[in-house]
């Protein structure tokens, strides 16, 4: 590949401040991008510019008629079922995901018809298993290898739910609200789904915590009541569904099934650390601390998605107000509460009952002394990523309040080169 002329190269950042300034003004960054103000970025090599609108018609079709026709369907919907399965494109095509979901269901009922009195192996895919003998009101559940089947199946379920909502509900909603650019339709749909998912998961997490000794972030109980090897059906379902969601998100990210953002590395680190925390906390029977982290992340993500959605709709004042609320929630949840969790891990770890301070999985005990650092390390890494993003958040707010650059957001990541239609008119 021919080298780029020296004159066209960007200057290498000579300080952390320059690096941060570059990110804050980068329209393709997942956090700062939606709030960057500026002109359209240059077309990439080989990209053909879209024809400009004549003000009323495009290719002889009036704006009003195009608006009534609805948003265009994504190209990846037309590759065929077999191609979707072999290329993992089923993670983006809801009909293909639905087909994969239906296969175990059909096998389950077939097994029931053939061997109604035998244990059905397909039940592990759909419902929570491994009840603890002798428990009632409520029945408690423990871990088991069949949980992996549940985890895998609901990765497919989340693929179907996410894509069905974004393609058939949220993209048409964005179109009706006046968004016309293809990439912005996708981004609005992604944020709409994020509002629904994180809003729901955050509320469910708070509900689970409310019915446990750890309410409200009582860190001592993470350890003095250890091990938490028995879970209610609600808690086990919630935890495994969260696990499935993050596995699904990680697959989309690392397989690059969607257009990667420029902060790809940061997001990969975040997802790896999240999966590390979820997986280990579930395996070593420390689910209350995992749920506490879930809550701090999910609630702030819901507020952030809401602020970004308002910005895509060009509701500038509402977007700034929502962004201010988001900063408050992020500051409290992702920093204050997370630092409280870190403090508790460091200072309350020794409250674990003496009999449980051993590596004895058959008893539910895993937390030998060195495991303290295995818990602290991913939590500290996650806090480091959050602190980096926190600096960017304040820089975005500064630009919004003092430079009025939160509106008219555009980016190479969120623009297809076509102007938005302010209103639909007939010629």
Image (cartoon, grey):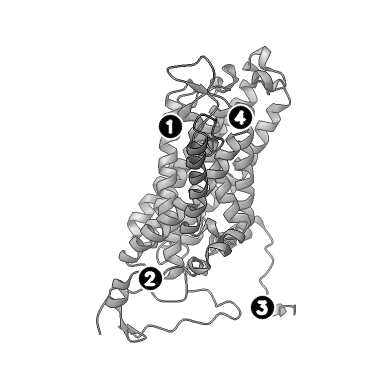
Which of the two discs, 1 and 4, labels the residue nearer the N terminus? 4
Q: Which residue is disc 1 drawn over?
A: 206
**Alpha-carbon distance for marks 2 and 4?**
48 Å
Above or below, 119 against 300 in this view is above
Residue 131 position within the rendered picture, expressed as x and y whole percent measured from the top left: 53, 23
Which residue is most to the front? 114
Which residue is most to the left? 426
Quadrant that contains the C terminus: bottom left
| Circles 1, 4 touching at the beta carbon (< 8 Å) | no
Residue 228 position within the rendered picture, expressed as x and y whole percent measured from the top left: 57, 22
- Mark 2 or 4: in front is 4
**Alpha-carbon distance for marks 3 and 2?**
32 Å
SS class, disc 2: loop
SS class, disc 1: helix
Res. 8 mark: 3
Answer yes or no: is residue 278 visible.
Answer: no
SS class, disc 4: loop
Above or below, 4 against 312 in this view is below
Q: Which residue is disc 4 drawn over?
A: 144
Quadrant that contains the N terminus: bottom right
Q: Residue at x 52, y 52 (%)?
A: 100
| Circles 3, 4 touching at the beta carbon (< 8 Å) | no
Res. 180 mark: 2
Q: Residue at x 63, y 17 (%)?
A: 352
Residue 6 falls in image quadrant: bottom right
- Mark 3 or 2: in front is 2
Q: Residues within 10 Å of mark 4 (few under 14, many from 20)?
A: few
Which of the two discs, 3 and 2, labels the residue nearer the N terminus? 3
């Amino acid at each position: 590949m021919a080298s780029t002329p020296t004159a066209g190269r960007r200057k290498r950042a000579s300080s952390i401040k320059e690096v941060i300034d570059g990110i804050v003004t980068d329209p393709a960054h997942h956090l700062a991008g939606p709030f960057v103000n500026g002109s359209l970025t240059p077309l990439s090599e080989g990209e053909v510019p879209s024809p400009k609108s004549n003000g009323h018609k495009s290719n002889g079709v009036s704006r009003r008629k195009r608006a009534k026709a609805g948003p265009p369907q994504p190209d990846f919907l037309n590759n065929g079922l077999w191609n979707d399965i072999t290329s993992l494109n089923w993670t983006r095509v809801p009909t293909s995901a639905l087909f994969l979901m239906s296969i175990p269901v059909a096998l389950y009922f077939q097994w029931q018809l053939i061997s109604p009195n035998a244990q059905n192996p397909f039940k592990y895919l759909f419902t929570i298993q491994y009840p603890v003998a002798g428990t009632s009101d409520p029945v408690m559940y423990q871990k088991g290898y069949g949980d992996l089947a549940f985890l895998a199946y609901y990765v497919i379920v989340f693929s179907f739910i996410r894509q069905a909502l974004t393609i058939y509900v949220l993209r048409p909603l964005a179109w009706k609200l006046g968004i016309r650019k293809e990439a912005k339709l996708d981004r609005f749909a992604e944020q709409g789904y994020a509002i629904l998912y994180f809003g729901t998961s955050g509320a469910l997490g708070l509900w689970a915590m409310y019915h446990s000794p750890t309410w409200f972030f009582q860190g001592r109980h993470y350890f003095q009541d250890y091990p938490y090897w028995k879970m209610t059906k609600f808690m086990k379902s919630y935890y495994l569904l969260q696990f499935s969601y993050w596995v699904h998100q990680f697959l989309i990210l690392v397989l690059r099934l969607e257009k990667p953002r420029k902060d790809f590395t940061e997001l990969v680190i975040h997802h790896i650390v999240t999966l590390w925390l979820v997986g280990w906390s579930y395996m070593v029977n420390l689910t209350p601390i995992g749920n506490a982290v879930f809550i701090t992340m999910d609630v702030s993500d819901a507020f952030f998605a809401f602020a970004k959605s308002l910005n895509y709709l060009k509701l500038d004042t509402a977007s700034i107000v929502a962004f201010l609320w988001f900063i408050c929630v992020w500051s409290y949840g992702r920093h204050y509460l997370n630092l409280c969790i870190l403090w508790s891990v460091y200072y309350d770890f020794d409250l674990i009952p003496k009999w449980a301070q051993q590596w004895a999985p058959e008893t539910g005990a895993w937390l030998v002394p060195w495991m303290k650092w295995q818990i602290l390390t991913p939590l500290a890494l996650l806090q480091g990523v959050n602190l980096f993003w926190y600096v960017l958040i304040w820089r975005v707010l500064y630009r919004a309040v003092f430079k009025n650059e939160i509106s008219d957001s555009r980016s190479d990541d969120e623009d297809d080169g076509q102007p938005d239609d302010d209103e639909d008119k007939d010629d």
